[in-house]
Amino acid sequence: MNSLFASLAQNLKKLEAEPNQNRAREAEPRRAGEVRGGGAMEALLELEKVQRVLSLMSSRGLSHADSSGGGAAADRFLAQFLLFMVQPFDSLTMENKFLLVSELLAKATPDTLEEMQHLTHLEANQDIPSGGLLQPIKKSKMHAENSTIQAVPMVGFDAMTRAKSTLEDFCRSYFMFHGLDVNEPQAIFKYLPVLCFTESYIYQLDASNEDCLHVVPNDNTSKVLGKKEEALIETSLSQMIEPLEGLLQCQGLMTDRLGTELKSGIQYWSLERKLCQALLRNEKISIEDVMKAIHLKSFDYRVLNLLMFQLTGQHVNELHMDFLSVSEFLVEISDDLYDYEDDVMNNTFNILRMFAAIYGPLEAPNMLAKCIGEAEEKYESFSKKLEPSLSGSYWRRCEEATKEGGKISGHAYGTWNIPRVISNEDSFRRERLSKHDASAVII
């Protein structure tokens, strides 16, 4: 085994050479027009490193991919452990570390590990389990406007700030479906830690995905990802969500349905990249992909709602889930109409952008209005099946949200107003950036 560690060390030294060259280039001052994306690339390099170790394990007969041992998850755990072992630690040699671990494993038992888990329960709740402790600690890039997940699972302050409005809306709109009074502080703070961490973690991943969509400011072009890089980023996001799943599993909150809903978030981010990159390439997009994306977009609300069923010890109410799913669809359209110009500038998913690309700028508003009408009919149908008191409470909440948001367009209780469709997005971006630069000079 110690010869394997030595072999791994040699291989990893070669592997580190390429990332170091990349980091050296990143340390240089950024030139105008260069694409931001160092955080995503570092995550991809980490994945590549793990893949090389997995290949080496396979060639040396060290894989443990059988059904009883956990399959691929067992192999990833062992790969992370080997990577941890070959990291320099004070003056310990490979042989020293090998002997120390061998002696420890000869004495330790699964009961010992369980005892350790109980002793460190509070720390485990704060530092998300799922292999993260086997990774060497790395500095996390922190930007004034954005912070992205690196090697160590974490939630950034920016992600928590962005999650704040969603959490407030969720508590005010969804707690009533669990028999809770949002005006009672105990009802909020009892469940807030889990809800806040989960939503903030999702926003952190969303920020990583958005790094791949932004238009470069000075030449109005975009970083158009290749197929291989897109696949790597999707794999990276999938692995980044595993620590959240591990935390929820440790808290006894994880269910198959919740896991499926979390994975639907990865599907949404993948579709968002696919559709928004296609728009920049002037490629055709399908209405099926667009409608799937808009339905997946509210996956975080469904994740929080499923967590509430677990936290309160209730069975999932399918009628409530169906009703809220239609409501979420209408709210997403309302938000897209309100944020339309900003989404064009940032090259993010927006249903009006997508409809304009499919049906053209003249027909898009009519097709979207038809889509809204059909959803509103479905919404009214489900609403009539709810308990009258619950239906009335939700009605009042929707009216409050519409007034507080100051939106002209709304969902079932507001007035829909579809903005003028931007027929040439590139020209719109250039004009908006030109005005911004001019105002900056005047200031």
Image (cartoon, grey):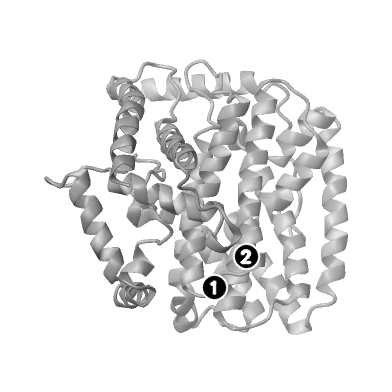
- Against 198, residue 21 (above or below) is above
Residue drawn at x 29%, y 67% is 106
Looking at marks 1 and 2 on the same chain, the residue that comes earlier in the sequence is marked by 1
Whether residue 136 is visible: no
Q: Secondary structure at mark 2?
A: helix
Residue 228 lies, in percent from the top left, at: 59, 28
Density class for disc 1 (Cα within 10 Å; few <14, some 14-19, many ≥20) is some
Up-down: is 377 above or below 98?
below
Horizontal side of 70 relative to 159 (left or right) equals: right
Residue contact between numbered discs 1 and 2, judged by CB atoms under 8 Å: yes
Residue bearing the label numbered 2: 258
| Mark 2 residue crowding within 10 angstroms, few (<14) / some (14–19) / many (20+) | many
User: Is 263 displayed left or right of 189 in the figure?
Assistant: right
Q: Quadrant of residue 420?
A: top right
Q: Amino acid at mark 1?
A: Leu
Provide residue 352's location: percent of width, then percent of height: 73, 38
Describe residue 286's horizontal placement relative to residue 203 as left or right. Answer: right
State the residue at coordinates (66%, 77%): 177
Q: Amino acid at mark 2?
A: Leu
Q: Which residue is mark 1?
A: 253
Residue 356 lies, with reference to residue 321, above or below; the image says above
Camera-nearest residue between 227 and 51: 51
Q: Is residue 89 left or right of residue 165?
A: left
